[in-house]
Image (cartoon, rainbow, N blue to C red):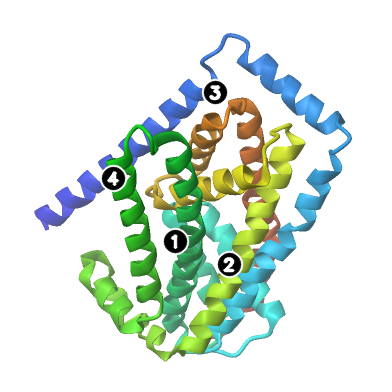
Amino acid sequence: MNIDSNRRFLLYMGKAMVLLLTLFFLYQQIFSGPDTLLSWATIWQEAFASPVRYLLLLTALLIPVNWGFEARKWQLLGSKVERMSFKKAYRAVMVGLTLGFITPNRIGDYAGRVLVLKSQQRLEAIGAIFIGRFSQLVATVLVGAGGLFYFLVQFYWTLYPAACLSLLVVLLALSGAMLLLLYNARAMVALVAAVRPLRKVVRYVAVMNRYSTREVTRLLWLSLGRYMVFLTQFVLLLYMFKVRLPLVQYLSGVSGTFFLKSMAPSVTLLSDLGVRELSAMFLFGLLGQDRLQVLSASLSLWLLNIAVPSALGLVFVFRLKFRRKGKPA
């Protein structure tokens, strides 16, 4: 018992340290100049007064498309536990988004989606949610590895060829390993069982064995579709905030940012706010872009895709509670 308590304490201390370091470096990046706040205010004023301010509306219109891809994924995955319409799947995703917004690692996303289900075996949906999130991570790694490869070749290859080659091998191996895990449910379940804190949920993730290769491939394409919507939103916002780059650098910078964010441990209660911003400022800084303009685009992306939908999702959370009130457990 003491050993477990000590491990939990060390884990929390480690997460707290990562969070503090993230905030510290973010502060250093943003407020290193004396006139930072004034410059930042000017950037926002110019963006909303520019001829391309309509890009903000276009980005906002893509929000339901983004979460629509996620809802379609959940409809496909959750059907092994309980058949559901696209509308119900969308509602479950919104409830999960709202509850996940305020919990580390978005644990509330699991509870939110499970609560919408009526099946007596609804806890089996934990495995379905897990594989859905993993497929999105696979999409992020596959595209992001290409983005990071661009930066390795452009900025570091001539100086550190051996190190760059090693990193390239690591990226390829990571991409291949994640694809193999996605298409090998038995290995996935074994991996979950190997992580001691997750052993209690192994019996709930057995549903992962019930997806065919065709269904997994369909799931991966949906994940890639959602990824491309998210990437497009970021590029549109960067352009609105006067970040001007060739298309290949836009794609490499954004995909590399998403990759680095996905690899960082989730330690905050606000969906890793700060990690993506640091990653974006670093990569786009290599491309010679102003850090405050990049930061403005990244924060806008977070507000539009996470904060605003999470607030709107409260409507579904309240309706869910109202419907279940008075019903037998």
Q: Judge the density around disc 3: few (<14), some (14-19), many (≥20) Cα neighbours within 10 Å.
A: some
Left or right of 252, for residue 245: right
* SS at circle 4: helix
Q: Quadrant of residue 316?
A: bottom right
Q: Which residue is mark 3?
A: 30
Residue 175 coordinates in the image, percent (x, y) = 39, 63
* SS at circle 1: loop
Residue 105 coordinates in the image, percent (x, y) = 43, 55
Residue kind at label 1, given as amino acid type: Ile
Front disc: 1 or 2: 2
Distance from label 1 to label 2 (Cα)?
Answer: 23 Å
Q: Residue at x 37, y 60 (%)?
A: 172
Q: Nearer the viewer, residue 88 or 228?
A: 228
Note whether 122 is above or below 7 in the view shown.
below
Q: Which residue is mark 4?
A: 12
Distance from label 4 to label 3 (Cα)?
Answer: 27 Å
Note whether 88 is above or below 290 in the view shown.
below
Mark 1 or 4, nearer chain start: 4
Mark 2 or 3, nearer chain start: 3
Q: Which residue is mark 1?
A: 107
Q: Which residue is mark 2?
A: 224
Q: Residue at x 56, y 65 (%)?
A: 96
Confirm whether residue 329 shows in the render: no
Distance from label 1 to label 4 (Cα)?
Answer: 16 Å
Q: Judge the density around disc 1: few (<14), some (14-19), many (≥20) Cα neighbours within 10 Å.
A: some
Q: Residue at x 51, y 76 (%)?
A: 114
Front disc: 2 or 3: 2
